[in-house]
Amino acid sequence: MTVSIVVPLYNEDENVDILHEKLRQTLDQAGLEYEILYVDDGSTDKTLSKLEEIQAKDKKVVVLSLRRNFGQTAAFAAGFDFARGDVVVTMDGDLQNDPGDIPKMLELIKTHDLVSGWRKKRKDPFFTRRLPSILANWVISKVTGVKLHDYGCSLKAYRRDVIKNLKLYGEMHRFIPAVASWYGVRVAEVETTHYPRLRGKSKYGLSRTVKVILDLITVKFLQSFSTKPLQFFGPIGLLSGLLGFLISLYLSIEKIFLGKPLGGRPLLLLGVLLIIVGIQLIGMGLLGEMLVRVYHESQRKPIYVIKKVLGPEIK
Ligand code: UDP
Ligand code: MG
């Protein structure tokens, strides 16, 4: 089993040397065949030059330097594209994760496709980080149906085929377990050690929670309805249209048979509104159906994922 470690780094020049030393020690001790991919996410400090020094001395190191700061998810994606190991391990570059946890994750990956870390004793500020994260984790587990305690933990291990099948956008890296389980991937969770950030600054605050929630909506939508948007918009549209139709019918009957004037009846407005909304929603569903076909067919992206093919002999 060969292992690729992927570490995104954005302005972490105070951490890289210590990080590399610790990583190297742990991996060598565990007797692993490995490579380390450091992804410099457009740092403006000395991170890149320090990485270059490390790379010059250690041939197991690959350094990827992004042109500007693209964000942690993009940095992971870059690392994934260049990773060559059978197993890919991701972790933060600020020494908040413990490289010492890697061996036990690799042990679990033998029987699973994805192993996710759980920062049980998380060492981050309570109000800006831990509290929003508790709420977010609760919502994510309800919405995605994938039961993990800590989606945000960067320390994760993946079998190669899991990540090679993924496209990452936005802040999506925390949703990989959810997306992957849609592909039928076996997910395990393991407790990992977490340290407070001693050097350098955290790049995130409260505003990240909003992004995560929006991404969650996207993921949920793609997960459940990406191949059948009309099933999503259709029922609401039908319901709204039907309600509007009934209201209008009631108003028409009163007008025709009882002679009640239509003007000055607020209900009329509601009836018309509901009909229009209904038509719009069904229209959106149909447009969605067309988009889905364009999406899948232009990328030749099948609507299934194959694990293994046995036979045939003839190609
Ligand atoms: N990071 C990155 N690009 C960014 C922001 C962060 O590559 O735009 C890296 C950062 O250098 C660190 C990891 O992602 O290695 C986690 O970032 P941070 O420690 O700031 O997040 P927190 O631990 O506070 O959630
Ligand atoms: Mg951190």
Image (cartoon, rainbow, N blue to C red):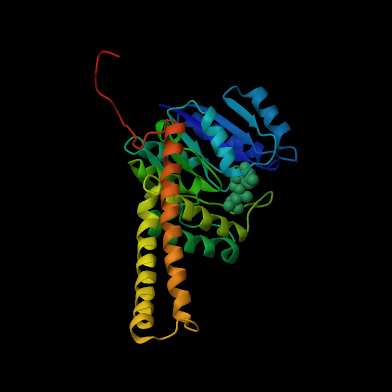
Measured from the top left, where is residue 253 in percent x and y?
A: 34, 79
Quadrant of the drawing holding the C terminus: top left
Measured from the top left, where is residue 89 in percent x and y?
A: 48, 37
Q: Is residue 250 rendered to the left or right of residue 53?
A: left
In the figure, 122 relative to 7: above or below?
A: below
Q: Residue 18 sits in which quadrant?
A: top right
- At 48% from the left and 75% from the top, the residue drawn is 269
Q: Which residue is most to the right?
A: 45
In the figure, 116 relative to 121: above or below?
A: above
- At 66% from the left and 34% from the top, the residue drawn is 66
Quadrant of the drawing holding the N terminus: top left
In the figure, 204 relative to 42: above or below?
A: below
Q: Is residue 264 rendered to the left or right of residue 161?
A: right
Residue placed most toward the observer, 233 or 150:
233
Residue placed most toward the observer, 190 or 128:
128
Q: Which residue is most to the top?
A: 314
Measured from the top left, where is residue 111 in percent x and y?
A: 31, 37
Q: Is residue 196 rendered to the left or right of residue 311?
A: right
- At 38% from the left and 82% from the top, the residue drawn is 255
Q: Is residue 95 visible?
A: no
Q: Residue 308 sits in which quadrant?
A: top left
Q: Is residue 88 rendered to the left or right of residue 50?
A: left
Measured from the top left, where is residue 309 in percent x and y?
A: 28, 25
